[in-house]
Image (cartoon, rainbow, N blue to C red):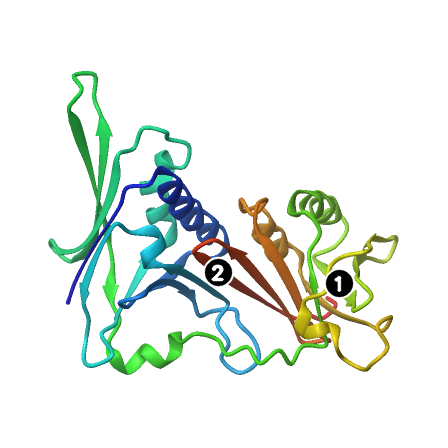
Amino acid sequence: MKFRGKIIEIGCIRQFTQLITDVSRLAKSCILRLNSNHVCLVVSDGGALGGTPGLWAELEQQHYFSEYSMEGVSEENQIFLELQTDKLAKTLSSLRSSQSTRSLKIKLTKKLSPCLTFEIELPSASGRSRLVLHDVPVSLIPRRLWAAHQEPRMSHQFDVSIYLPPIKTLRHVVDRMKTFSSRATLSGSRSGTLVVSVSNSEVAASTHFRNLTVPAWDADRNDDPETAYGTSVDIKKLSSFLQGDHNTAKVICNIVSGRLVHLFLMQEGITLQYFLPAVSAP
């Protein structure tokens, strides 16, 4: 197995490192899946609906990498690695706000154990480049276990789909609601209304967002557009997703009533799917 890639565009470096930071907030470990077209980050724990992963993030390698080469296993030409997200995020933390990084190289190496080696090219006072190296330990996933880390199949069989309001606004609402309950209920309708609510034995609170956009695949159904469908989810997990730098992204909230909330984020060159299973009242 071989893998190496190089990112030179500063915007792509920052977006890549921000994604790693976002994933580290949502899970302690993840699977890195590499093939000839995409780099995927997969969290298989915490999903719902028969083996659906908890998180699936997919980057188009042609958008991010100026150089990209790999030799995977078998005719499928894929590599599956497991790594600790906090170690990876710490390695790349300095790059999120850096405006001077010249390049970021990533290579699968063999030290005392398999590693992803990150080579960061930075300028120096003398005008020459200086290199900073970080090794992040990884575990190779055998082929017999690959089936547990496959892309989720979304058939659009949701009760309702609706675009979220501005993430910064929604994050503020959810963070205030965390003081009242461990779970939040998301209810949406095809009329473009999303309601976020919490309750406990002493108080009930809700915030209504109206005139939101409904995706085209959900706009042509024949049922009553005012019918609302809702699911209660872990409010801390919802808040963790909203802490990410998603302000320029479009996020669709898909709801399977009483079972699942599926958050689908889209940016240039990247998609991220986050699955929140329903939780019952304590």
227 lies left or right of 169: right
**Residue 32 found in image quarter:** bottom left
Q: Secondary structure at mark 2?
A: strand
- Specify the amino acid type for callout 1: Thr
124 relative to 148, above or below = above
Q: Residue furthest left?
A: 111
Across and down, in percent, residue 15 comes to 42, 45
Q: Nearer the viewer, residue 204 or 153?
A: 153
Which residue is painted at 81% across and 56% down in the image? 211
14 lies left or right of 152: left
Which residue is painted at 25% across and 39% down in the image? 103
**Residue 99 found in image quarter:** top left
Which residue is painted at 57% across and 81% down in the image? 155
The residue singled out by tag 1 in the image is 185
Q: Residue furthest top?
A: 125
150 lies left or right of 48: left
Across and down, in percent, residue 85 comes to 38, 53
- Specify the amino acid type for callout 2: Thr
**Residue 182 found in image quarter:** bottom right
Pointer 2 or 1: first along the chain: 1
Q: 10 Å neighbourhood of mark 2: few (<14), some, or many (≥20)?
A: some
Q: Nearer the viewer, residue 125 or 61?
A: 61
Which residue is painted at 25% across and 59% down in the image? 138
Across and down, in percent, residue 28 comes to 42, 56
Q: 10 Å neighbourhood of mark 1: few (<14), some, or many (≥20)?
A: many
The residue singled out by tag 2 in the image is 271
Q: What's the distance in space between the residues labelled 2 and 1, CA to CA?
A: 24 Å
Which quadrant does the C terminus fall into?
Answer: bottom right
